Amino acid sequence: MKIVVAGTGYVGLVTAVCLSEIGHNVTCVDVNEEKINMLNEGKSPIFEPGLEELMTKNKERLTYTLDYKKAYRDADVIFIGVGTPEKKDGSANLTYVYQVAKEIANNVEKDTIVVVKSTVPIGTNKKIEKHLKENLKNNVKIEVVSNPEFLSQGTAVRDTLHAQRIVIGVTSKRAETVMRQVYDGFNQEYLITDRESAEMVKYASNDFLALKISYINEIANLCEIVGANIQDVTKGMGMDKRIGNKFLNAGIGYGGSCFPKDTKALSWLANYNDYEIKTIKAAIEVNENQKLKLIKKSRKYYESLEGLNVAVLGLTFKPNTDDLREAPSLDNIPILIEERAKIKAYDPIGENNFKKTYPKEAITYCKNVKETIKDADICFIFTEWDDIKNFDITLYKKLMRTPIILDGRNCYDLNEIKKEKVIYESIGRKTINNLK
Ligand code: UGA
């Protein structure tokens, strides 16, 4: 079976590499020459643990090319894994998906299954099929299958190879059979449904998780007010199997390329159909406020941060990725810059991407936590990287000028922090003030 994957971002590349791992020959197509050159040198253009190793292991079965015409011509299955970024009005931008569809239509010379992996609004698969059929240059059969992706950045390879589900939206038995052949070897549970339901599974799943996070963040905010501890609360909640203990970590809001975009897209879609999806709208609003929670907390200690040494730990939207999209750091750093704080920042992987927006003149980038917090008047923690979580907490007092730590990811054990001569504020837990 000849499989082609269009797009070498998180979804496309990880899918391609994992399919090669179970024995398929896969051709990856991208329009970005720089990316294709990197891939041909055996390097991954995205930071994703385990990906480069699998690329090397399966290099005989992987081809990377700019030549989409040749790739699509005789493909049995073509995956579309290109981006669907957010438009200004919150809807999904489908330009890249339709571009690929057009190129497929112009070039296929045999019956082909086109699999849409990109996250697309409900109804799009059907429209893509129509678009393909209208633009076909040759007399071939083409079918569009919806096969949403559920991988998370940072654990994408594991999530794909050991996914909890494979959701397939089809209109024919033939397409279902081909898709089962594609995934034979993954050994996972299938949901075979119509295309609209498959598309909705993706949005409903992401938006439910976003809602869960916003819900727990609100409970955390309330915990702070009434003196409860969010971690004990979520532990207690998670003991109920109906609720589960996953995705209940309170923090300074969700970021990334998926939850913010997919909540807005579903809300847009609902509006477009004259329906107001109130729960998702609330989740979005809560998240926007939550992202600025640490700055608000800082006002208790400093009216303004002007001229102060401010340490920032973590820039990416979560650990184990270099992705900054919708990261809380992007909402907070501009405020710090505007207030003319002297910012030192550290992120194990995200520094280079961050520098593209905030060059060295605005921020001093440091090589580790120690260097960052040295002489600081306040420290903000935005991402729970391992070396931030495992940092020796006794050093805050020793190194900072004023040891005020505002932890947006509940990195430290309150019982340990209590022993330190610091001010420590986290999310949904009591404030420790040992500087009084
Ligand atoms: C998310 C979903 O988890 C994947 O299932 C989905 O396939 C993917 O979107 C996608 O649509 O492509 P991802 O954005 O990589 O994956 O990251 P998550 O691990 O879900 O984290 C998203 C955000 O939620 C992060 O900012 C994280 O810090 C935050 N989060 C997560 C919390 O604040 N609390 C939690 O308990 C969990």
Image: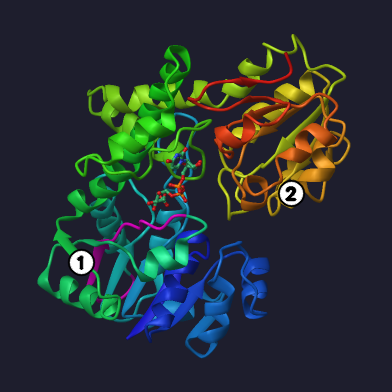
* Residue 50 rendering spot, x and y as whole percentages: 54, 71
Residue type beneath disc 2: Glu
Answer yes or no: disc 2 within 8 Å of ligand 1.
no
The quadrant holding residue 410 is top right
How many C-alpha atoms fall within 10 Å of the one at disc 1: few (<14), some, or many (≥20)?
Answer: few
Q: What element carries label 1?
A: loop
- Is 338 on the left-hand or right-hand side of 140? right
Q: What label does residue 351 carry, if any?
A: 2
Residue placed at 34% from the left, 68% from the top?
162
Q: Earlier in the sequence, mark 2 or mark 1?
A: 1
Q: In this view, does 142 lie to the left or right of 44?
A: left
- Would residue 12 be found to the left or right of residue 161 on screen? right
Residue contact at pointers 2 and 1, CB within 8 angstroms: no
Which range is magenta?
Answer: 137-152
Q: How far apart are marks 2 and 1 (CA)?
A: 39 Å
Query: Which residue, as the protein is rendered here, is positioned at the far left?
Result: 173
Is the CB of mark 1 within 8 Å of ligand 1? Answer: no
Amino acid type, label 1 = Glu
* Residue 257 screen position, x and y as percent: 50, 45
Q: In the rendered structure, does residue 138 fall within the stretch colored magenta?
A: yes
- The residue identified by callout 1 is 189
Question: Magenta stretch: residue 176 in it?
Answer: no
Name the residue located 81 percent from the left edge and 44 percent from the top edge: 370
* Magenta highlight: main SS: loop
| Residue 209 shows up from this direction | yes
Name the quadrant containing residue 67. Answer: bottom right
Asked whether the viewer can see residue 358, the reply is no
